[in-house]
Amino acid sequence: MSPIGRSEIRVVIQPSQASAAPAEAIPAVFFKRVFDAVLAALIAADREIHAKAASSEFLVSHLSAGACEFGIVEKIRATAPSASAIALFRRCAGRVYRSDYQILLQYQRLMRAFQRIVAALDPGYVVLVRFHDTELPLDEFFRRQVDRVGLRNDVRPLTDMWFSGSVITSFDGRLEAIDYRGALWKGRLTLAGGETQIDCVFDKAMGEDALNPFGNKDVSITGRAIFTGDSQLPERVEIMTIEQQPRATVAIDLRGALAPAAVGDWEDGLDHLHQR
């Protein structure tokens, strides 16, 4: 398979494990629905960042019948800003997948295009979007995330931007398994108390042996957080230190803690209650 370029996406369609359909039998109507929805989303992303006269051109870059895979490459006009529609598509899809909905609320065209994508999905098939350095499943979880965006009404004005730059800060949460493949070692931290996720990048100098104990654990990380100004959350955190968060090992017995006190219990005041 040829490598995926930075200005390209690949979309793979395969029957799900629960489906009895053979791998080569992808219905043409379903393939067209997915292709049209993805292309429409790229065009919507392009309209968000480029004037019509400077809009990007999208070309079919790859077709594979055996793997049922297609690729689309973006050709940015020389007179247009260097902003990429594929990069915006990727950023918004990734943020929504990690429950950071605010960015998509700022791009209404792209939000409607994502709704078209999830409407095109079929539970009998797995759709995977691949970029040059990562991939994103368009699955049932992604569909629910996009549906949640449609239910929100806390739209923040585009002129009301967040901090842009980098700061050294800390986050607590549960770290998923660390991916040691590729030029960068990566992982995702699910923040404590919710579903929001942050991309983490690890220094290879730490070594796999030092990092392995933290996979799928509750941790506290400190690192350089990179903010792009279009979200209250960082785009990624470059990890400097990491430590495991201890969990309580002894259960606290609360039986009877909320039982009503007898009248006589109050005669000697609160000190009497604390001693019981």
Image: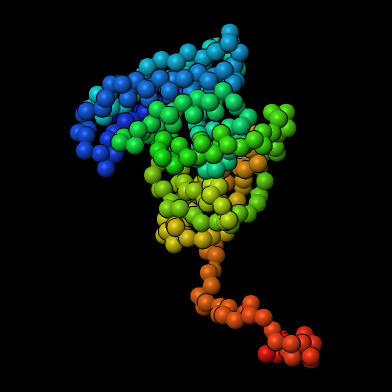
Which quadrant is the C terminus positioned in? Answer: bottom right
Q: Position of residue 212 (x, y in %)?
A: 42, 58
| Residue at the top extreme, as displayed | 53
Q: Residue shown at 51%/36% (left/top)?
A: 147
Q: Position of residue 33 (x, y in %)?
A: 37, 22
Q: Position of residue 222 (x, y in %)?
A: 60, 54
Residue 151, by quadrant, is: top right
Q: Is residue 230 left or right of residue 182?
A: right
The front one of 18 and 185 is 18
The front one of 3 and 175 is 175
Q: Is residue 4 visible?
A: no
Q: Residue shown at 20%/33% (left/top)?
A: 22
Q: Residue shown at 48%/22% (left/top)?
A: 42
Q: Position of residue 103 (x, y in %)?
A: 60, 34
Which quadrant is the N terminus positioned in? Answer: top left
Q: Is residue 153 visible?
A: yes
Q: Is residue 36 left or right of residue 23?
A: right
Here the colouring is rainbow
Q: Is residue 144 left or right of residue 270?
A: left
Q: Is residue 22 above or below residue 272?
A: above
The front one of 13 and 20 is 20
Counting the numbered discs, the total is: 0
Q: Is residue 188 above or below residue 63?
A: below
Q: Is residue 238 above or below residue 160?
A: below
Residue 24, by quadrant, is: top left
Q: Residue shown at 32%/31% (left/top)?
A: 13
